[in-house]
Amino acid sequence: MPSEGGWPILGVSDHGCRTLEVAMTGTPHVVSDVMTQTVLALRHGAAFKDIVKALQRWQVSAAPVLDDDGRVVGVVSEADLLHKEEARTAAPAGYGQGRSGPDSPESASVTAAALMTTPAITVRPEAPLPEAARTMARHGVKRLPVVDADGLLQGVVSRADLLKVFLRGDEDIAEEIRRQILPHLFPDSAEPVRVLVRDGVVTLTGRVPDTALIPVAVGWVRGVDGVVAVECALAGPPRRPDLDPDLPDAGRVPPHRGRAHRLPEGSGGS
């Protein structure tokens, strides 16, 4: 694992950076498409002062903590560091004066293992982007370590990374809808459904053979990466008077609605 100043750093090599660029040239669908691969990771024995310096140098508010095998065992955030500082300043007046603070021997004995929040809230590289967003919202965190099946750190995904999906071009969104959604739902449509995308807002217009599938189409389109909203103006096929008895038709003789006329007995009715 590459390191700098004793800190493990993932993906520093040119190869790692190129991998990220290649992933972002396509349509982002999963966490590995948007995650940052060049990340700061802390050893579990890192001291308080060194953690503060590392976070400031890398301009991040949190970093994953690794064990000796490179597995993520927790996360140290600025909030964790501030909690430690709050506990120190809450001590009785005069206690430890001249000895406490980031440069004191006491702070040097406080390590990432003691400060970190554990277990770490993580996500897998193959997780869909909405799943990562829901995990962040559920746990109230701004970023997630990305780990493989063995718990090894692969990168970090942040809220800003997830928002990259909305940078997708309108025509790219429209093309995916035309090619991957509409042919599956409406293969026998007499006229093509028109798709217009502007600033991520999709408008669907036209007639479809089965109106029951319209809500399904809206749901599928809403799930396309980069879609902000869906405006649906789809309708069913035009109604035909010759097939619908409820529609008026001047050329059709209305059915007789009077009483049936019975022929006298013995009269020829054949």
Image (cartoon, rainbow, N blue to C red):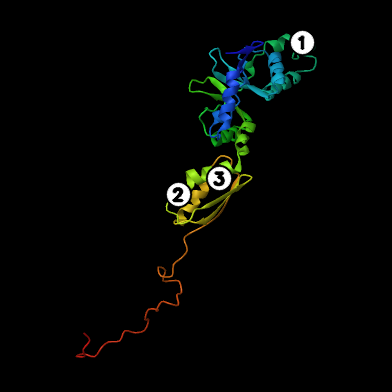
Q: Which residue is mark 2?
A: 185
The residue type indicated by label 1 comes to Arg
Q: Is residue 104 visible?
A: yes
Distance of label 3 from label 2 (alpha carbons): 16 Å
Distance of label 1 from label 3 (alpha carbons): 64 Å
Q: Earlier in the sequence, mark 1 or mark 2?
A: 1
Q: Earlier in the sequence, mark 1 or mark 3?
A: 1
Residue 217 is situated, as x and y percent measured from the top left of the image, at 50, 49
Asked whether 148 or 77 is in front, the reply is 148
Residue 77 is situated, as x and y percent measured from the top left of the image, at 66, 23
Q: In the drawing, does residue 209 fall left or right of residue 46?
A: left
Q: Considering only vertical position in the picture, is 11 above or below 108?
A: below
Mark linked to residue 174: 3
Where disc 3 sits, the SS reads: helix
Residue extending farthest top = 105
Distance of label 1 from label 2 (alpha carbons): 71 Å
The residue type indicated by label 3 comes to Ala
Q: Which residue is mark 1?
A: 99
Q: Nearer the viewer, mark 1 or mark 3?
A: 3
Q: Nearer the viewer, mark 1 or mark 2?
A: 2
Q: Is residue 84 visible?
A: no
Q: Earlier in the sequence, mark 3 or mark 2?
A: 3
